[in-house]
Structures are given as C-alpha cells and as structure tokens.
Image (cartoon, rainbow, N blue to C red):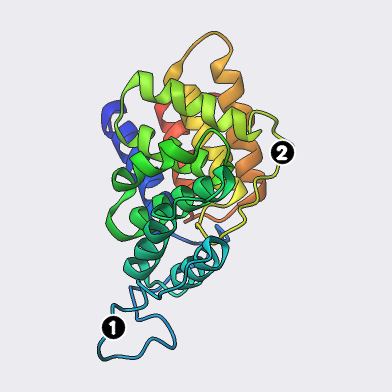
Amino acid sequence: MNKKILVLFTIGIIIMIASGCGSGGGSGRYTIPPEIPTPGTGGTGGTGGGDTGETDPDSLIASAWEDFRYGAYSSAINKFNQVLTISNISEEQKVAAYNGLGWALTKSSGVESGYSSFTQAASANNEARVGLSAALIQRGQLAGFKQAIQLLEEVGLQNTAFVFQSTHPIGISNAEAHAMLAFCYFWRNELGDHDKARAQINVARAEDSSNDSSVAQIYNSLKDIALSGI
C-alpha cells in the first residue's frame, strides 16, 4: 500500500472514530445503537421527543444527552437547537448546546456536519475541540492538520501523561485522542514533529494494545508510512 493510500486510510479511521463507526477491539468506546425513539416519548403523535415544551436550558441539555446516549440523535438535535432559541441562555449554556449539537450531528450525518457547531464551542470546550479536530483532519489539508494540532494541544494532549476524559458518551477514548494527535504531527512534518508523533502513538499504543482497534490501525499506518522507533 503506497503512502497516499495509507494516509487516506488513516484519515478514514479517524473519521470513523469520531462518527462512532470505529473498529472497537478494546478502544473503550461506548457503542451507541442505531437511532431509536426516546424512552417515554411513545410511538404515536408528537415529535419524537424533540419539542418537549421545556424551557429550562439545563434540563433540555441534560435531556438531549440522554437521547444521545440511547441513539435518538434527531431528538437530541432538536433539543440542542431548542436551547439555542432561548434568548436569555448564558454563554456556558450556549457552548454546551453547540457542543452537544455538533456531536449529535456527527453521529447522525458524519463529522463534517458537526463542523459549524463545533466551531461555535471549541474556544471553551474540550469535547468540541476534539470534534472540530476530527472534522479538520477529514478534509486532508495541511492547514487543517495544523489547526487540529493547535486544538488538540489546547485540550492538553501534547503532554503524553495527560488523560482525556469526556464528560459525555462521545465515543473518543484517551488513546484514540493521542493517536489522532500523533497522525497530525507526522503529517505536519515540522522540525521535531516525528519525535512528537512517536511519543504520542507510543503512549496511545501502551494504553490500547488491541490488534484490531482504531489505535492499532493508526499505529500500523504510521509504521508503514515509515515513522521509525515505534
């Protein structure tokens, strides 16, 4: 497999990590089933739990994440959007709603669909930073990889001892986040980047040693592309 194909393959793996279609195999991700009705909303009439009449933003956000957890992404999207129509929400609530909307759109329609929402939340939310990074990586452009590195470093991942822990079941493990950063460093290819990529993928592989996980696939791609010392 030539270098270009390996790079495209690895980008595809990262897209699958973010969208919830990864290979599993020890990644520790929460596996979310296909979209199902929100528990308690019934099967007739209504809007599937999207417009509840609820006006408290925190309650709506919590309810949307519960829908998300059960795979009811359309309902979650509706509720996060409902929060954003409330005129007196705080900046923190707005960021939380945009982050949730980005992930619900990503799981429903792919990581690119979450790009705009992640952009609205990434200045203050680590989950949104990771989601936006995945959307930028998907585009396969050097400028996007550089921006993804900045975002992932803002999360704290440049420190190999840092452990990324999401608040919500977005499906990105700490090992996968470090593996994403490793690939970005290798792609940027500036002075010292191969050392950084090596350190990141080695720590990811130490945490996730499965032979068929997304981390293993990124590790093997970097090895085949000729990242030495791994």
Mark 1 to mark 2 CA distance (whole Å): 45 Å
Amino acid, disc 1: Gly
Q: Where is residue 102 in the image (x, y as percent from the top left)?
A: 40, 50
Q: Where is residue 10 in the image (x, y as percent from the top left)?
A: 37, 39
2 vs 60, nearest the viewer: 60
Q: Mark 2 packing: few (<14 Cα in 10 Å), some, or many (20+)? A: few
Determine the secondary structure under disc 2: loop
Q: Residue at x 40, y 27 (%)?
A: 225
Determine the secondary structure under disc 1: loop
Q: In which quarter of the image is residue 7?
A: top left
What residue would you read off at disc 1? 46
116 vs 79, nearest the viewer: 79
**Extreme residue in the front direction:** 88
What residue would you read off at disc 2? 162
Q: Position of residue 11 (x, y in %)?
A: 35, 38
- The quadrant of the image that shows the N terminus is top left
**Extreme residue in the top direction:** 191
Amino acid, disc 2: Phe
- The quadrant of the image that shows the C terminus is top right
Left or right: 188 in relation to 209: left
Q: Residue at x 30, y 51 (%)?
A: 110
Q: Which residue is drawn at 29% across and 90% down?
A: 43
